Amino acid sequence: FLGEQVTPEIIERTGIERELQQALTNLQAEAEALAAAATNRVAAPEDASTNGATGLGGSLGARASAVQAAAGARPGEPLLGAALDFSRYARIEALGDGEAKQKMRKFEDDLQVAQKEAGQSKTTVEGTRRLHGKGFVTKSELEKEELAYENSQLKVKTAQTARDLFMRYEFSKTAEETLSKYAEAVRELIRARKAAISKLAQAEAKLKMSQGQYNIQARQRAELYEQLDKCLIKATKPGLVVYGSGRDDMFYGGEERIREGATVRERQALITIPDLTRMTVRVKIHESYIKTIQRGQKARITVDAFPDKVLTGEVAKVGVLPDSQNRWLNPDLKVYLTTISISSTNDWLRPGMSAKVEILVDRLEDAVYVPLQAVCLDNGSYYCYLANGARPERRRVEVGPFNDEFIAVKQGLKEGEQVLLRPPGRDAPGERQSEAASPGGPKPPPPPSPPAGAAPGSPA
């Protein structure tokens, strides 16, 4: 409105430009602080969320209000340093090219035109009066010229009044309104920059939060693909694949059978490739015999599927604690797991086969032995009945070690003598069964254990 010559001076005097620069500087510092806060907020992507971004955006309003207060740009307050007297600029030579200069020049031009017309009318009236005095013009013509002169005088006064009113009132009012609009535009600029910084900070926070979530999901996706790749198990060598776990006693403390949909644990053996060149047999030894079993003892093994083939082996491991697999069936039964390694390699031998094992706990040289049923116990002494014609001979004997079939006789019998398998006078072999016994007392019953199973062995 005032032109480019006066406007910078007025802005400088009011301090609007300084306030604007200070507000922009504060907003720039606030933007950097908000960016740093957004970076720190998404430093831990696991805790980032949409609510977090909203909370960050909500804090921007308070921070931006603080910037506005620091810049002195409170809503409803003009950014004016002091009241100004604009009348001192109401001169054409003091104004630059602007609306005010154009209006003032128009008012001056209108006044000059009115003054020139009034001068011409005055000259015309004076000439007409002289002519009327000499009788050359009529009185009506004189009155007409005088009326035209009065109109021109009125035009001069009107133009002068319009110029004075513009200079005194309208010029200052319009200048103040223009300055107020400029100050409001500055406040709107600060508000717009504040809103833009707030939205930008929210967008950056949301971007970084999304990037953090993307990185987490990408890492999880990579881990899932890695786990999927590990689901493909490649054999390290050729052989027979068997399940590594899952026994028939799964409902009584054992692991669930390996099948589709089964739940497995970490480090659980799923499948194995047994070394068929080193096979072992797991047997259960009753607690009454476990003291006679030692590592390194030889054994004879007969597989149920191939009863005509006898394998050799030795005791590789003796259990220290009793087996608790089937303890719920018979709590009083104590058996110890013993591992027998098979010495030879056989292509027909497969894991899981049932076998019978005979462990050689002792070997007697030049021993006299009889069937276990031929020895009877009577009042703490052992007797045998010899076949001696019609009257069998009862002879007291001293017995030694025994197995499931035979018992050694240290004294009382000679090699070649015939003994009865039951005392004479009995109708059936099962009568007076309590008299048949083994050294040291009645022979304990054999442990009711299932057939031993052949299992793959491991190198010693």
Image (tube, rainbow, N blue to C red):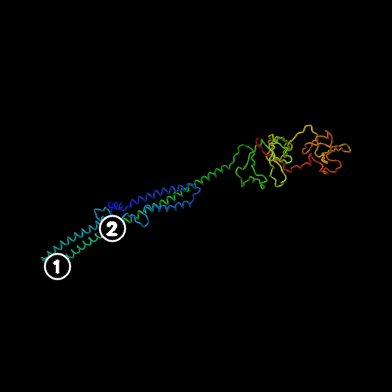
| Image position of 228 with respect to 142: above or below | above
| x, y percent for residue 125 | 15, 63
Query: Helix, strand, or loop for circle 1?
Result: helix
Query: Label 1 vs label 2: CA separation?
Result: 49 Å
62 sits to left or right of 95: right
- The numbered mark, 1 or 2, whose residue comes first in the sequence reads 1
Residue holding disc 2: 172
Q: Residues within 10 Å of mark 1 (few under 14, many from 20)?
A: some
Disc sitting over residue 83 in the figure: none
Residue type for callout 1: Lys
Residue holding disc 1: 139
Task: Name the quadrant of the C terminus.
Answer: top right
Quarter of the view holding residue 149? bottom left
| x, y percent for residue 107 | 24, 58
156 sits to left or right of 374: left
Residue visible at 64% across and 43% down? 245
| x, y percent for residue 12 | 30, 51
| x, y percent for residue 176 | 30, 57
325 sits to left or right of 84: right
Q: How many marks?
A: 2
Residue type for callout 2: Ser
